[in-house]
Structures are given as C-alpha cells and as structure tokens.
Image: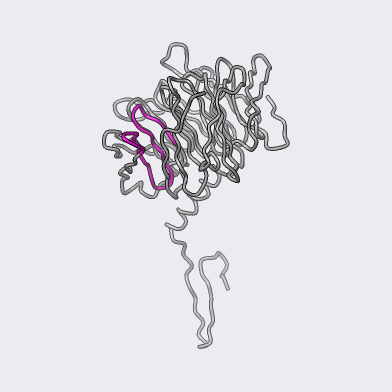
C-alpha cells in the first residue's frame, strides 16, 4: 500500500511483520529520464523538421516525400519530387546554390539527391548499397564534399566528393562505421569532419583514409548528449541536453570552455555574423555575441510554442556584420524572425503525410 503523498510504502510478509518504507527516487535515474524525454521530444516526429533559406527569398523544407521551395513574397511554390519515401535530412551549400536531400526509409538502399533550388531540377544522385536511411547531411565549406550519416544501428558515415566541383561525377571518397550511439549532427571544418551525439564527439580526418579520434570530454559533461553543433570561426560550439554551450579546441580536440546558456536543452545551433544563434527545447531563439572570450546574450525571441526548436537558419544583413532574419522550425511550423523589428511571423506550416502546406 502507498500512503497518501506517495512518499511511504507499507508492506506485510509471511513473518507477520508490517514494514513502512520510505520511497525515494534516485536523482540520477530522474535526470536520465528527463534527458531521455528531451531527446524523444526532439526526435518525436517521423518527418524531417528542417527549414532552410535558399536563394533570395526562398524557404526550403521537406514534406510528405517532396521538398517544397516557397517564395512568400511572390506567392509561388515549386517542388523537388525525386524521392520515393519520406525525407530524412536536408542540407544547403554555403552559397545556397545546391541542396542535398536524402531518403529516410531503411528498408532498401537509400538515395541522396543533389539539386538546384532555383529550378528544382536534379543535378546528381548518390547511393551505396550500405546506406539504409539518411539521418544527417552536411556540405563542406568549399561545396566539394558531402557527408552523410545513416540511420541504421551502426550510424555509418559516408563522404562523397565532387570532381572539380562537378557533382554529376561525384564518387564515394570515404566510408566508416560511426558507432552504436545515435549521431545528432555532422559538421565539416576546413580539414576534418565532426560528428556528435550521446556521450561522444568524434573527429574524423581524411588522410590517408577516414580515421577517427575521440574528443576529450570533461567530467561534468561526460553524461550529456550533444544535440547540435556549429562552427564559430575557428571554434566548434556544441549544444547539450542540459542547456550548455561547450567550446572545443580543434587542435587538441578537447573542451576549453563550458557555460550554461539555456534553462532547457539546446536543440539547434547556427553560426551568424554576431557569433552564434541557438534554439532551445522550450521554444526560445537567442543570438549570442562572442566577446572577451565569453558568450553574451544580444537578443532573444519567443516563437510562442512550448515545443523544441528543431532547426535554425539565418539570412545575414548586406553589411555582413549582423543577422537580418532567422528561420526557426518548432511544432511543425516555420517561423521567420526579423532581427531588426523583433517581429515573429509564421512563414509556413510543415504538413505531415496527407496534409497540404500553408503559407
């Protein structure tokens, strides 16, 4: 029997003894359950909750097995329709002239499509018999490489390279098993590939072949899940399930700084002219400035939901020194934030299967 209030339990045994037990919850177990609920909330949807800026006023997002390219100012929409299943991941190149999108289905070998967002026409398709479901994609800064993480239990890592920038002649240049822990994000630097997830951050080099070295995690953060990451100049910033920013030294692959940024999990990060933009599991979007070797909060926006920010993208001001607008996805809705006026508007509703997009 549980007494009123739930703090004590009464039991009786064959020895005719009646015992009163105090009921306590292990704080570590509670913390693990809370972290698991945060991660489940981020991964709860069966579609890729990502929206990205294309060229000019384009917004690109996947929906029901197609990628929709929307221009709200012109009230036009175009579709990339080469996928045969739901879309697992989408990425744009640094120039925004290329889009990569990959199948989520793991029942058969998956395909990745490279395409032109202006015309929604195919440039190239990439595939491998070992690729079963795409969970993450990232272009290299020079746009000549594409990294992919598979969604199978080995979280395989694939890297394709375009010959002289020509993606129609791309070849698989690197491949490796990624490990049994889920990989939350993948990120290129100028010289290596970084993949992070639960209790780990791995640095992959390309010489002579794809080889890995593990990041040195501090004692206080060794149980954290790294949910996202972004390059800020020569530094790597990762966001944790505990709401912290972790700064990494890329020469020694170790932590050089950690600071509490949000009261809830940091679910998305994006580099911006000021420093970094972060999104949290409680629907907040914040711009941070890096000054005197520390993060300082510049602006914060509430998109009006209690759901996690699943993705972020930014459009810089023409002066190159500030952010003009931010694209954030939360609760299957794409929000556009003006950093000039502070206004938050709903740019689009990202539909599930059977629904139609709205803008």
Residue 204 colored magenta?
A: yes
Q: Residue furthest bottom?
A: 15
Q: Answer left or right for 236 relative to 12.
A: left
Please determine whether, in this image, residue 33 is positioned above or below residue 209.
Answer: below
Tell me if I can see residue 51 in this picture: yes
Please determine whether, in this image, residue 122 is positioned above or below residue 212.
Answer: above
Work out which quarter of the rendered image holds the C terminus and state it: top right
Q: Residue 311 location in percent, x, y?
A: 53, 32
Q: Count how many numbered circles sit on residues in the image.
A: 0
Tell me if I can see residue 242 in this picture: no
Q: Residue furthest top?
A: 319
Q: Residue at x 60, y 42 (%)?
A: 105
Kindly report the secondary structure that dominates the magenta region of the rendered protein.
strand
Q: Nearer the viewer, residue 98 or 343?
A: 98
In which image quadrant can residue 310 be found? top right
Work out which quarter of the rendered image holds the N terminus and state it: bottom right
Q: Which residues lie in the magenta part?
A: 186-210
Q: Residue 130 location in percent, x, y?
A: 51, 43
Residue 235 colored magenta?
A: no
Q: Answer left or right for 282 relative to 273.
A: right
Q: Residue 148 location in percent, x, y?
A: 48, 36
Q: Answer left or right for 70 relative to 222.
A: right
Q: Which residue is drawn at 30% across and 33% down?
A: 250
Q: Which residue is drawn at 53% across and 84% down?
A: 13
Q: Residue at x 44, y 50 (%)?
A: 180
Q: Residue 335 location in percent, x, y?
A: 59, 27
């Amino acid at each position: 029997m549980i007494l009123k209030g739930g703090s004590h339990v009464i039991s009786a045994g064959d020895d005719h003894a009646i015992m009163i037990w105090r009921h306590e919850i292990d704080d570590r177990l509670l913390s693990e359950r809370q972290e698991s609920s945060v991660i489940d909330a981020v991964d709860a949807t069966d579609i890729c909750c990502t929206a990205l800026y294309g060229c000019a006023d384009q917004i690109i997002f996947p929906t029901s097995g197609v990628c929709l390219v929307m221009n709200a100012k012109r009230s036009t929409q175009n579709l990339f329709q080469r996928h045969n299943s739901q879309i697992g991941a989408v990425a744009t190149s640094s120039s925004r002239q290329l889009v990569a999108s990959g199948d989520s289905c793991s029942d058969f070998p998956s395909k990745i499509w490279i395409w032109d967002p202006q015309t929604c026409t195919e440039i190239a398709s990439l595939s491998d018999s070992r690729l079963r479901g795409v969970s993450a994609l990232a272009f290299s800064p020079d746009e000549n490489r594409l990294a992919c993480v598979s969604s199978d239990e080995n979280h395989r890592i694939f890297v394709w390279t375009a010959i002289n920038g020509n993606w129609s002649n791309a070849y698989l240049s690197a491949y490796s098993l990624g490990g049994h822990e889920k990989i939350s994000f993948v990120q290129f630097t100028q010289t290596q590939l970084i993949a992070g997830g639960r209790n780990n951050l791995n640095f992959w080099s390309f010489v002579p072949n794809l080889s890995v070295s593990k990041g040195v995690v501090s004692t206080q953060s060794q149980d954290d899940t790294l949910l996202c990451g972004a390059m800020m100049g020569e530094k790597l910033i990762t966001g944790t399930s505990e709401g912290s920013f972790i700064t990494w030294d890329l020469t020694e692959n170790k932590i050089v700084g950690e600071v509490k940024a949000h009261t809830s999990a940091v679910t998305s990060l994006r580099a911006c002219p000021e420093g970094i933009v972060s999104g949290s599991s409680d629907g907040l979007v914040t711009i941070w400035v890096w000054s005197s070797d520390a993060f300082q909060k510049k602006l914060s926006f509430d998109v009006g939901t209690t759901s996690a920010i699943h993705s972020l993208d930014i459009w810089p001001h023409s002066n190159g020194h500030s952010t003009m607008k931010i694209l954030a996805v939360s609760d299957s809705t794409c929000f556009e934030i003006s950093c000039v006026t502070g206004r938050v508007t709903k740019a689009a509703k990202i539909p599930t299967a059977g629904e139609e997009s709205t803008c």
